[in-house]
Amino acid sequence: MTHLQPQQLFMPTPTDSPKTIRITRTASNFEREKLIRPFGFKGGFLTELWQAVALLESELGQQGIGLGTQSVLYGDADLFARHSEAGGNAFMYALTEKALQLSKEIPFTTPIDLIDKLLPQVMAEGQKITGKKDLNPNFVYNALISVDNAAWLLYAAENKVKNFDNLIPQDYRQALAYHNNKIAIMYQVPYGMPVEEIKKAAQQGYFVIKIKSGQPGTQSEMLQKDMDRLTQIHTALKDSPTSQTKNGKLIYTIDPNGRYEKKETLMRFLDHAKKIGAFNQILLIEEPLAESNEEEVADTGVIITADESIHDEKDALRRLEQGYKGMVLKGIAKTLSLSMKIARLAHQRQVPCFCADLTVNPILIDWNKNLAARLLPFPGLDMGMMETNGDMNYLNWKKMQTYHPAAGASWTQAKNGVFELNQEYYQRSGGILEPSTHYQQMFSASR
């Protein structure tokens, strides 16, 4: 890390040993938020996202009110396909409520300790609730987001922590010690987005275009659709300029969400990218292969990053051994607690990370942003990188923005394809440790 300028690194002073926290009261609620149009990925489509809200109260009377955006399609696509959309969401919400009840029995010092102890119990409960013995761990992590989020806020209150840098436990601080001035926004392009909207995004300054691939159908149908879609997008964008990259060209990232069953199919897609002149603009491909796929990917000629298949540090090491060269952190999909572990491992192995979205609400965007802000700049960029797509998908986005404690702050607004982070951002941690009146009011009558 010697090549970094000193002012870009921040190591907070060691804090006292954290207190042991005991939870004595919990509560939960949720809001259903409609999407502007069906949102397609993983071969399926969402029409709404439930915003889960969890309250944890300690024996000392301190509280944490945490948020989680439920995405059953992300968590377990098979479960999503077997049930109605509301039915799948009901399963996940029931699991969150069960996790809250179990948390009363687990004293903890850091939220990482709490999640470690909760995870096997909640996994077993999830299998019971859904009736699915092979329930994907990502479904369980997604159900734990609001609990984990509340635990971090309770941890901050108990230990009088005022900013995100000091919120990070000592063992994880070195991996999250950078302070980026800018974060590149990955502009998500789902299956059905009209090309005119994509062109408009480029004109507005977005320069990292994240293309959802792995479209519905058989493997051969999927591949043909994905190749046609890449041709369509590249034809529209290949001459679009940007001042944010060294060569003045836009960057593509491809996200098949594990839909490619074999490496051979992926290589055919990449051959097509070369044929149409798009290959050199592809920065990375997120989790292209099925979780069970063990094929080596070091020879693909592009950075392959791991996402859905990482459920713990052991999984991350397995992917690194297979030639994966990057890690996707999802503090808003697989808990901040797990993301800190993966960030530490990646830092030790000198593997770059970025943060992907789950179409989360405005406050959770800033939880994700606090993580992305402290990662080393992604190779090929002089800044961090994160995805956010709530503004293009939620019907009531403008209203949801008003729930943010720092609503309207400069760092919440995209400017020329980036979030600009100033000193106030780091002092206030993006507003995430400040109370949200909207979510507090959900529990005002529950005492």
Image (cartoon, rainbow, N blue to C red):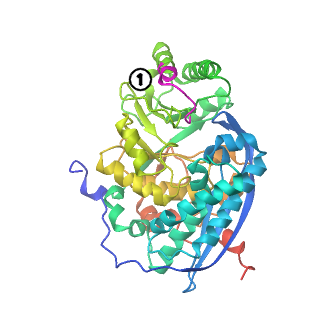
Report the number of numbered marks: 1
Q: Residue at x 51, y 36 (%)?
A: 292
- Report the residue that reaches farthest toward the top: 275
The image quadrant of residue 58 is: bottom right
- Report the residue that reaches farthest toward the bottom: 60
> In the figure, 62 relative to 336: above or below?
below
Give, as a single range, the part of the protein colored magenta. Answer: 257-267
- Residue 176, position as x, y percentages in the image: 36, 57
Q: Residues within 10 Å of mark 1 (few under 14, many from 20)?
A: few
- Residue 213, position as x, y percentages in the image: 58, 29
Q: Residue at x 47, y 24 (%)?
A: 263
| Residue type, label 1 | Asn
Please give the residue where the numbered disc 1 appears in the rendered image. 280
> In the figure, 98 relative to 329: above or below?
below
Residue 178 in sight from this viewpoint: no
- Residue 412, position as x, y percentages in the image: 55, 55
Asked if residue 364 lies in the magenta stretch, the reply is: no
235 or 95: nearer the viewer: 95
Element marked by disc 1: helix
Q: Residue at x 36, y 39 (%)?
A: 320
Assign the C terminus to one quadrant of the image.
bottom right
Residue 87 in sight from this viewpoint: yes
- Residue 262, position as x, y percentages in the image: 51, 25
291 or 442: nearer the viewer: 291
The image quadrant of residue 284 is: top left
> In the figure, 49 relative to 100: above or below?
above
Q: Residue at x 65, y 56 (%)?
A: 126
